[in-house]
Image (spheres, coloured by chain):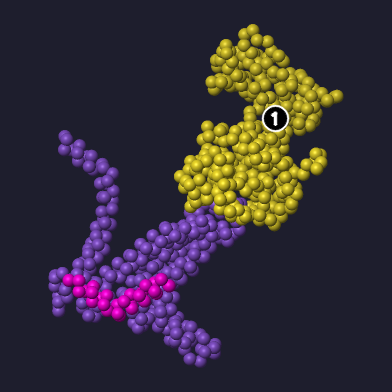
Chain colours: A yellow, B purple
Amino acid sequence: MTLSAPRPIIALRDVQKYYSDYHALRGITAEIQQGEFFSLLGPSGCGKTTLLRTIAGFEDVSSGTVHIDGKDMDGVPANVRPTNMVFQSYAIFPHLTVAENVGFGLRRAALSRTEKAAEVDAALKMVGLTGYGGRAAHALSGGQRQRVALARALILKPKVLLLDEPLSALDKKMREQMQIELRRLQRQVGITFILVTHDQEEALIMSDRIAVMFEGQIAQLASPQQLYRRPISRQVAEFIGVMNFLPVQVLGENGGRVQLNVAGLGACEITAEQCPSGVQIGAASVGLRPETLTVLFEGEVARGRELLGRVEEVQYFGDMTSYEVSLPDVARPVSISMRNLVGRQVLERGAPARVAWEEGALVLFC
Amino acid sequence: MMQSSLIGRVARSENLRGWAMVSPTALVAILLLAAPLGMIVAFSFMTDGYLEILPEFTLENYTKAWADPLFRQILFRSLYVSALVTAATVVLAFPIAYFVSFHVAPERKSLWLFLITIPFWTSYLIRVFLWKVILGYSGVINSGLMGLGLISEPLTFFNYSVSAIIVTLAHAYAPFAILPIFVALERIDRSLLEASRDLGEGHLRTFWRVTLPLSIAGVVSAVLIVFIPTVGDYVTPQLIGGGKIPLVANLIQNRMLDLDNKPAGSALAVSSMVIVAIISVAFLWANRRYLRVGR
């Protein structure tokens, strides 16, 4: 076994999907590695669920190939594929008990009745539902249904577990708890998870890698940090978190440094690494995350550069305060989020604000 | 003051409103269903006079009825015909309901249901007559086959037979079976079928383990909706059977009107009603107890 270039568990090559005249998937190419927690992130209608269903075998590809564990899945029906799915609605069989639901797919396995029962118990234990086996499926809460759906899929030890927005029906607390639990479970079983979600925070928290999808295409496939810090386009940057955009003139490029003149901020120089979409001389825009800007208080000294603005709007979140600050020569106020540290007062609307920023935080979009 | 608030409270009470809402229907039901039924039950325990019914309690009507081999034979035949009609109807209705629910585009479903109910546009009597035209001695089938030269003499086995009655009734009751099964199939969350496929089951096993158990309530309603009224069907055996194959309703009619023995007829009616009720309850119970398909 060689360490170099491990075979991807899933390889998608130029996957296209048409629904009559609607082009749902427009050439998806991606490789997903064994044991990875992979997310498909995008707004509704971007094709992420279609892609998941294509991997599961519920949709045929119009062209292109899907390989799972090295095998071409063309013509392989869903019931034969080495994948299992956690459905958005959980799809718990209402006429069966919890144990019968979890053991549903074990019929084919050559197991005795007691072995099956032991497997079901183990699966229930894994998802924290020990002792729930005899309950009627319809008497479960949302979170419990979710766990049953997980146990039912994982009991078959699939090569890939597909999760279609599994947390969207849960309330916030439960969702946060399940995010941690899903991640823990994934590490424990070592199975590749593919999660479909429209919630960027969820994708960032849980994934090893994320594919951001728009209109049937992957806009960017990267790690959460890379995606957040170096989004490849304004569209991706806007979808993941909040970003302030400022018009910019790209003046020149030499020796890995790029010279800019940013509206309101003035002349500055950034590294090529801060230009994920490349460099083109002329008008473009730069992005700045709200937390990379700082509102300075009396006596504080800027680490980078400083300019004077005015507070237009204040939103107090308890742990954080979000400001909208207008800067000279910048058309729209910029968002700045500040942690409410001890002793740091909250500025009022209309107050002057000294804003500090750093060149290293800029991202150029050409 | 107290009085008016009490009246106000009563008028506002949800219960009273509920009763007020159902009272017209309830009144009709009591007058046209419950009261005649009560009279039939009462008659069945009375003595038959020459021209009138004597209000003297007796069990003789029942003992006579059950001692009569003709009644037992005809009741048994009615149940047998009904059971076959039910089986035929439900077995044939299921694929139709399944087709409409699973293979017809959502916007076309109401059109299909509409088409299925078209037979109801003509009266039951006319539909029965139509089957008579088709199945009769010189009916469509016989004249067709003779015209084609396939047979030289009209076939008789389906003219005035139990099978002709079954065909006619099965056709007449088909929509009653299709609709409840369709409704049950419509309620099935389609992701459950995908889940079953995802968990390794093919189409047939998915049908057996998910679709059928989840639609069984519709099948049970279809069975009862078809079975109960067909036991008491009067028109079809009269017209299709040519009066030669009476079912229990024909016998009751004969006792009630031809022989003018209302107590005897009532006893037959009550007896068959009780038998049907017992069979239906037993069926429901058995279904709950044993027919847990797909486990």
User: How far across and down, in percent of the image, does residue B276 sit?
Assistant: 33, 67
Membership of B72 in magenta stretch: yes
Q: Amino acid at mark 1?
A: Gln
Q: Is residue A273 magenta?
A: no
| Label 1 SS | helix
Question: Residue B219 falls in which quadrant of the image?
Answer: bottom left
Chain label for disc 1: A
Residue under pointer 1: A225
Quadrant where the C terminus of chain A is found in the figure: top right
Q: Nearer the viewer, residue A246 or B168?
A: B168
Kindly identify the residue that appears in the image at 20 percent across and 67 percent down.
B42
Height in image: A335 above or below A62? above
Task: Note whether residue A168 is visible.
Answer: no
In the shown orientation, is residue A11 left or right of residue A290? right
Residue drawn at 67 percent across, 45 percent down: A160
Question: Does A175 sit left or right of A216 as displayed?
Answer: left
Give the residue at x 54% y 90%: B149
Residue, far top: A299
Q: Position of residue B250 (x, y in %)?
A: 31, 77
Where are the magenta residues, as a range? B58-84
Q: From the viewer's perspective, is B158 left or right of B106?
A: left
A157 and B147: which is toward the camera: A157
Seen in the image, is A240 located left or right of residue B141? right
Question: What's the residue at 75%, 49% (across, down)?
Answer: A70
Residue at the extreme right of the image, as rendered:
A255
Does residue B32 lie above or below A231 as drawn? Answer: below
SS majority, magenta: helix
